[in-house]
């Protein structure tokens, strides 16, 4: 697990500001990065360094800026003060994370993108297209294309980068590993169905699900199949999260399954929603402080990550969660398919705030970094919220 930490504006020059009833909050937090879908290569969804926002003050969150395009957004990445995001209009955008001002935009081939960028070592990695698509590496400062790779079909899966290799799934039923510097194919492994799920990487293995209902564990160096787990013929759209030797996936039968990382043997199963067609689990889980957080059709649940025991379930029966949750400093952020971003106490599930957009929060999962919450909506706007400034 790798993520950058910038020490700019650290404790040497403390800055204080007033947020009304919430009192005075210190800005002496080291600047942190959210490099990819799920925060890190394990898809924990947990920013452990966030201290500016907490359960005590998120009730005061308010709109900071919006940025509009002609398409819907993928999940963003925020690195060194810049937000990177793909759009259904075919562009990748880089914008100032504090102001929303455009830094650059680059038009990519293959049509729009629902793949989320991974930003590592000054490079943006992202896929495009459905039937026809590409996978790109771009210069993070300029947006210039460094290299491109064309699989046999489009790429909806979001990449992970580890040890100089970028991993992603494609609609041609394959999982790819490319040299992150050159784009050369290191290996590709064929499955039996489209890979919409995004790979998680941990302990020398790559974990990913496919539309045939199979979760694969692949050797990260060779692509060899270490184990496979079948989800009762139910498609796996959810991307895995990995923590403490367990791989967590959501299934379209309304269950979450926890698998032993080394063997793929189920550790526990838990029903979090009604059966397929009513309450399938399409969202990816987040894991923080021994708790697994997962949204589904009509429910949002917190489970004991070791046992699957239900800790709490939010009363959100009228909405569906597809985007993945974010967890930071005792708060859970989860977008639904209406227009709301639910801000909940991570311990109790109590709703602390509801942030509203002009459309569904579907492909774009929320990101919480450096005291700002980001999410893209089907209103074709990227939204940013912060405490009053």
Image (cartoon, helix red, strand yellow):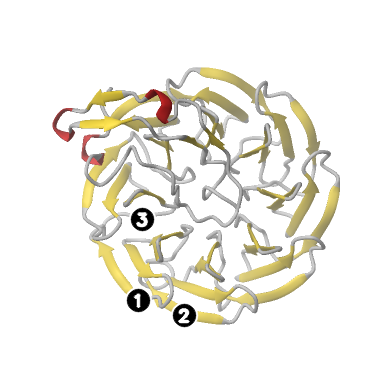
Quarter of the rendering containing residue 275: bottom left
Q: Which mark is residue 320?
A: 3
Secondary structure of the residue carrying numbered label 2: strand
Q: Earlier in the sequence, mark 1 or mark 3?
A: 1
Q: Which residue is mark 2?
A: 268
User: Dot 2, crowdedness within 10 Å: few (<14), some or many (≥20)?
Assistant: some
Q: Closer to the camera, 214 or 247?
A: 247
Q: Residue at x 57, y 67 (%)?
A: 235
Gap in Å between the C-alphas at discs 3 and 2?
Answer: 24 Å
Q: Which mark is residue 249?
A: none
Residue contact between numbered discs 1 and 3, judged by CB atoms under 8 Å: no
Q: Which residue is mark 1?
A: 309
- Residue furthest front in the image: 12
Gap in Å between the C-alphas at discs 1 and 3?
Answer: 22 Å
Residue 289 image position (x, y, % from top left) = 40, 61
Q: Is residue 202 left or right of residue 24?
A: right
Q: Residue at x 54, y 55 (%)?
A: 43
Residue 162 image position (x, y, % from top left) = 70, 50
Secondary structure of the residue carrying numbered label 1: loop
Q: Is residue 28 above or below residue 233?
A: above
Visible residue check, residue 335: no
Q: Residue at x 55, y 60 (%)?
A: 237
Quarter of the rendering containing residue 303: bottom left
């Amino acid at each position: 697990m790798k993520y950058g930490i910038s020490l700019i504006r650290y404790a040497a020059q403390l800055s204080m500001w007033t947020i009304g009833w919430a009192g005075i909050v210190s800005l002496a937090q080291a600047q942190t990065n959210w490099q990819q879908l799920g925060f890190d290569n394990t898809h924990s969804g947990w920013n452990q360094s966030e201290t500016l926002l907490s359960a005590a003050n998120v009730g005061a969150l308010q709109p900071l800026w919006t940025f509009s395009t002609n398409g819907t957004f993928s999940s963003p990445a925020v690195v060194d003060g810049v937000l990177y995001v793909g759009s259904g209009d075919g562009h990748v955008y880089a914008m100032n994370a504090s102001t929303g001002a455009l830094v650059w935009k680059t038009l990519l081939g293959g049509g729009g993108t629902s793949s989320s960028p991974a930003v590592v070592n000054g490079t943006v990695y992202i896929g495009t297209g459905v039937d026809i698509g590409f996978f790109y590496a771009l210069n993070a400062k300029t947006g210039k294309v460094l290299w491109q790779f064309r699989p046999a079909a489009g790429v909806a899966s979001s990449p992970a980068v580890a040890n100089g290799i970028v991993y992603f799934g494609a609609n041609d039923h394959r999982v790819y590993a490319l040299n992150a510097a050159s784009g050369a194919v290191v290996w590709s492994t064929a499955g039996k169905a489209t890979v919409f799920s995004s790979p998680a990487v941990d302990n020398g293995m790559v974990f990913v699900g496919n539309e045939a209902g199979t979760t694969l564990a692949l050797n990260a160096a060779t692509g060899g199949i270490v184990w496979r787990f079948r989800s009762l013929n139910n498609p796996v759209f959810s991307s895995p999260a990995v923590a403490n030797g367990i791989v967590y996936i959501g299934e379209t039968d309304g269950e979450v399954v926890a698998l032993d990382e080394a063997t793929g043997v189920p550790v526990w199963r838990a029903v979090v929603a009604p059966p397929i067609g009513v309450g399938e689990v399409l969202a990816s889980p987040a894991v923080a402080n021994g708790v697994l957080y997962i949204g589904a059709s009509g429910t949002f649940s917190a489970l004991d990550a070791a046992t699957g025991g239900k800790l709490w379930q939010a009363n959100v029966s009228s909405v569906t969660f597809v985007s993945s949750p974010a967890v930071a400093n005792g708060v859970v952020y989860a977008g639904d398919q209406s227009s709301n971003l639910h801000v909940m106490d991570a311990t109790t599930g109590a709703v602390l705030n509801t942030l509203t957009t002009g459309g569904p929060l579907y492909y774009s999962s929320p990101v919480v970094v450096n005291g700002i919450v980001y999410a893209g909506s089907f209103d074709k706007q990227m939204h940013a919220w912060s405490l009053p400034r």
